[in-house]
Image (cartoon, helix red, strand yellow):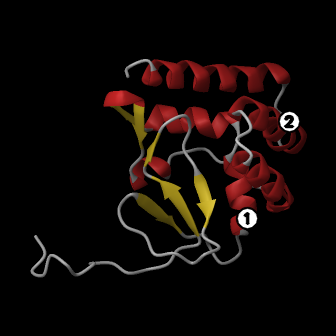
Amino acid sequence: IREDWYVVPSIKKSDALFIRRNNLYPRLIVNEAEAYTTDTMHRVNTKPNADIRAFTASYYNSLSFAFAEIVGRSYGGGVLELMPSEVEKILLPYNENHSDLLPEIDKMIRDKVDIDTILEYTDNILLKQTYGLTDVEISTAKRIWKKLANRRLGRK
């Protein structure tokens, strides 16, 4: 469609990057490197008064993961794909105090800690302590996410 196929049509930086196609769980990444992106990642920009680190940390919880599975689409091989209009529908329990959680979440992901262990940590703080969800409500959100993710991954 482009007149010059070799010209990148949109050169912009964003606050964070949301991976478009995912395997085990979708990832939201703070763009500390100020990298430019192609269509394999979605650009995420926050409002001026939002803290991108708190926003990113707030994403890693069972409730948000369940919403990602519900609004996203599943493709062959168990791939979860999320388009920008779908990403916007993910419920995110944002709290500006959550920025303090990001270094620990980042460390666990880099150390390849199992996502269930990460979610135990984040669900307790984000959903239970901050928003007052009960253990039963958190467990329900996690079961919904696991059921939908396992169904998707079972299509390999």
Total marks placed: 2
Q: Which mark is residue 53?
A: 1
Quarter where residue 128 is shown: top right
Horizontal side of residue 65 vs 53, given as left or right? left
Q: Secondary structure at mark 1?
A: helix
Residue 96 image position (x, y, % from top left) = 80, 62
Above or below residue 28? Residue 151 is above
Residue 107 at what x, y percent from top left? 78, 52
User: Looking at the image, which residue is at 73% across and 69% down?
Assistant: 51
Q: Residue furthest front?
A: 111
Residue 1, horizontal then vertical, whole percent = 10, 70
Q: Earlier in the sequence, mark 1 or mark 2?
A: 1
User: Residue 148 location in percent, x, y?
Assistant: 51, 22
Task: Name the image quarter holding residue 28.
Answer: bottom right
* Residue count near mark 1 (Cα–Cα under 10 Å), binned few <14, some 14–19, many ≥20: many
Q: Give the position of the C terminus as an image quadrant.
A: top left
Tell me the residue at 75%/21% (across/down): 139
What amino acid type should be assigned to the residue bearing mark 1?
Answer: Arg
Type of amino acid at the residue the image marks with label 2 = Asn
Q: Tell me: 64 left or right of 51.
A: left
Q: Nearer the viewer, residue 50 or 12?
A: 12
- CB within 8 Å, label 1 to label 2: no
Left or right of 155, for residue 64? right
Q: Real-space Cα distance between discs 1 and 2?
A: 18 Å
Please tell me whether residue 154 is drawn above or below residue 91 in the rendered image. Answer: above
Extreme residue in the right direction: 129
From the image, tell me which residue sits under label 2.
124
In this rendering, the answer to whether 38 lies above or below 68 is: below
Q: Residue at x 62, y 73 (%)?
A: 47
| Nearer the observer, 26 or 61 | 26
Q: Secondary structure at mark 2?
A: helix
